[in-house]
Amino acid sequence: MILYEVNLTVEASIYTLFSNWIQEHIQEMLEIKGFVKANLFEVIEPESTDYHLSIQYEVETIAHLEHYFQHHAAIMHQKGNDRFGAQIKVSRRILRYKNQQLKHLKSLTQSNKSIH
């Protein structure tokens, strides 16, 4: 499983409009083959007047994500740029699931429970 993370900074003046649009955008992304799930988070930034969001898409394989980049990404990115331009800032990253780290975290959690 691949996690495709999109981090957004949204100007406060367009946040309501953007919030409505991003829900539609996420649904459109989930129609692309290989995109199986999306989670939308608000990032807590107490010092900021802008809104910070993070969308984490679960993608079946790196091949599905590469297909997205080759055939869909430019169009999807352009839709946001056409609608909101410089009022949003976007960064993206790709994460690969590492099973051994989860096992380690699980054992730490179990150890902490036994301490309390």
Image (cartoon, rainbow, N blue to C red):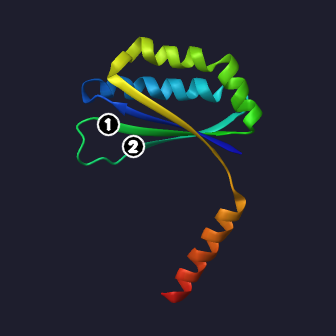
| Residue at (25, 49) in percent of width and height | 46
| Residue at (46, 18) in percent of width and height | 80
Q: Are marks 1 and 2 in contact (CB under 8 Å)?
A: yes
**How dense is the environment of label 1, judged by Cα within 10 Å: few (below 14), some, or many (20 and up)?**
some
Q: How many circles with numbers are drawn on the protein?
A: 2
Q: Position of residue 87 (x, y in %)?
A: 32, 22
Q: Residue furthest top?
A: 82
| Residue at (64, 18) in percent of width and height | 72
Horizontally, is 52 left or right of 3 in the view? left
Q: As shown in the figure, which amino acid type bears the numbered disc 1? A: Tyr
Q: Position of residue 23 (x, y in %)?
A: 48, 29
- In the picture, residue 107 is in which quadrant? bottom right
Nearer to the camera, 33 or 105: 105
Give the labeled residue for mark 1: 51
Q: Position of residue 42 (x, y in %)?
A: 39, 43
User: Is 73 rendered above or below residue 61?
Assistant: above
Give residue 42's mark: 2
Nearer to the camera, 14 or 24: 14
Q: Earlier in the sequence, mark 1 or mark 2?
A: 2
Q: Which image quarter is the N terminus in?
A: top right
Separation of disc 1 and disc 2 at Cα? 8 Å
